[in-house]
Each structure stands twice: as structure tokens, then as C-alpha cells.
Image: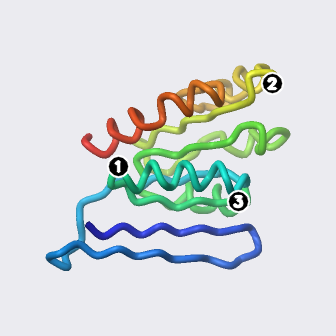
Amino acid sequence: MRIRCVRSDGSGRVFWIIWKNSRGGLAQTTELIVFEPDLLFSSRVESAATKAGVQVKVFGNLEEFIGEAKQTSAQVALVNLDAAEGKLASLEGLPKNASCKVIGYYSHVNSRLAEEARRVGVNMVLSRGAFVSKLEGILKEFSSG
């Protein structure tokens, strides 16, 4: 399987990781874009995506994520709502691809973000704990769909 993981840390630097399958061909993968500035948590999401055979791009900078979301063909966009607090209105109308599902997650103590995220069009809003427990299922759903 060939999977490309791209990480942008907000400084303009981009990191590429490439794996090849035994046939050397490109595997069919689902594209996932993620806004998560927490490097440890984003690594967890990347690892789960890789295991599910999902192509993933992680952004630590909201503006870069929004730029990608406006031109992507991704099927899933994951957003750390706590990190986007105060800028959730910029998520309205994203992404360009109408079939893309936007999933936001937030700290359970910051539940007002959930309502605000729904208002701007986030398709699924989960507490961070619920997101972690459902992440594998979410990735499987979109990688097989």
C-alpha cells in the first residue's frame, strides 16, 4: 500500500512520508484532512489513519487547513474545535467537496463550542473522548465507502 502523510506545522515546512506496496502501485485511499495543532494528538490520528489505509494531511495552522479544505477532494475533514475557538465562522461553507463530512471535536468542558460548530455547518460534533473512542470506526466507514 502506498500512503502519503503530509504534515504542516504552521511554519510553511511540509514533511512527507511515503510507503510502497509490494506491487509498486498506488493503493486506493480515502483522503482525510485534519486541523490539529497538538503534535501528540495529531500523531495518534495519523497512526489510526495509516492503519485504516487512509491518506491523511495534518495541519497545525487553521488558515492552511481552510485553504486546503477549499480545494480538496477529501471525504473527511477533522477539526479540533478548541484550537479553532474564536475562528469557527471561518469553517462555514467548507469544504468545496459537497460529499466531504466535517467532524469537529472539543473538550467536554467547552460544550458551547458544539452548538457554535453545528451553526457553521460541522456535520458531526463530538466530545474529544467520544471522538477518540469512535475514531477507528469513523476511518473504517470512510475508507470502505
Q: Which mark is residue 63?
A: none
- The nearer-to-camera label among 1 and 3 is 1
Report, in whole angstroms, how far the alpha carbon at label 1 lies from the one at label 3: 22 Å
Q: Which mark is residue 52?
A: 1
Residue farthest to the left?
Answer: 23
Amino acid type at circle 1 is: Ala
Upstream in sequence: badge 1 or badge 2: 1
Q: Which residue is mark 3?
A: 60
Whole-percent x and y of residue 71?
51, 61
- Marks counted in the figure total 3
Q: Please determine whether, in this image, residue 33 is positioned above or below residue 102.
A: below
Whole-percent x and y of residue 102?
53, 38
Which residue sits at x=68%, y=79%?
13
Which residue sits at x=46%, y=52%?
32
Amino acid type at circle 2 is: Asn
Q: Secondary structure at mark 1?
A: loop
Amino acid type at circle 3 is: Gly
Report, in whole angstroms, how far the alpha carbon at label 3 lies from the one at label 2: 20 Å
Q: Please determine whether, in this image, residue 107 is positioned above or below residue 66.
A: above
**35 on left or right of 74:** right
- Dot 2: few (<14), some (14–19), or many (≥20) neighbours within 10 Å? few
Which residue sits at x=75%, y=39%?
89
Q: Which residue is mark 2?
A: 110
- Dot 3: few (<14), some (14–19), or many (≥20) neighbours within 10 Å? many
Whole-percent x and y of residue 141?
33, 36
Q: Secondary structure at mark 3?
A: loop
